Amino acid sequence: MASDGARARVASLHGREAEAAAADKLRANGFQLLWQNLRIGALELDLVAKKGDLVVVVEVRARGPGSYEKPLASISRTKRRTLLRGVRALWKGRISKMPDVKRVRIDVAAVTRDAGGAMTIEWIAGAFTEDDA
C-alpha cells in the first residue's frame, strides 16, 4: 500500500503533466504562454496565455482513473471566488498595463487519465464569470 507521501508525489507529477498538456494545447491553438503557476500573493494561477487582444487564465483540474470526483466537479464556489480574486489582481497589476489586451477569459482544462495513463482534456472556454461567483 502506498504511503500518503508517495500518493502526494504521484498526484503532484500528474498535476504537472496535466498543466504541461494544457499549455501545449494553448500553444497549438496559437496562444503565447505568458505565465505558468503565477503567484499573486497567496493565490496561484495555473496558466495565463495571450492571443491577439485576449488573455486567457486557465485553471487546470486533473483526476486519475480511480478518482471519486471528476475534474469539473472539483471546482467549488470557494475555488471560483478565489480564482476570480486572482484574475482581478492580475488585471490590476499586470494585464491592464498591456495596451493591446481588451478581454480576459477564464477557462478550465479538465484533464482525466485512464487506467493506461492516456490523458484526455475537456476544455471549457469561458467556464465562469463574475456572475457565477
Image (cartoon, grey):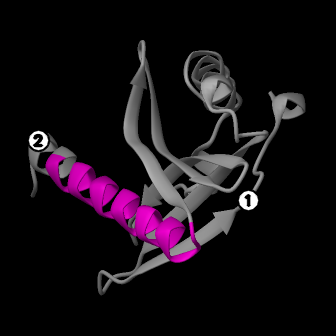
Q: Nearer the viewer, residue 2 or 97?
A: 97
Query: Chief secondary structure of the magenta span?
Result: helix
Q: Residue at x 50, y 77 (%)?
A: 28
User: Mark 1 or mark 2, which is nearer the start of the sequence?
Assistant: 2
Location of residue 10 in the rendering, given as x and y in whole percent from the top left corner: 19, 56
Residue 101 position (above or below residue 133): below
Q: Residue at x 73, y 49 (%)?
A: 53
Q: Is residue 61 left or right of residue 4?
A: right
The residue carrying pointer 1 sits among few (fewer than 14), some (14 to 19) or many (20 or more) residues within 10 Å by Cα, namely some
Q: Is residue 129 left or right of residue 99?
A: right
For the record, the magenta segment spans: 9-30
Q: Which mark, residue 5? A: 2
> Which residue lies most toward the right here?
131
Q: Residue at x 60, y 23 (%)?
A: 82
Mark 1 lies on residue: 125
Q: Residue at x 71, y 30 (%)?
A: 77
**Type of residue at label 2?**
Gly
Location of residue 102 in the rendering, given as x and y in whole percent from the top left corner: 79, 39
Q: Quadrant of residue 15?
A: bottom left
Q: Quadrant of the N terminus?
A: bottom left
Residue 80 position (above or below residue 48): above
> Which residue lies most toward the front here?
99
Location of residue 14 in the rendering, given as x and y in whole percent from the top left corner: 28, 60
| Total residue callouts | 2
Q: Nearer the viewer, residue 77 or 17?
A: 17
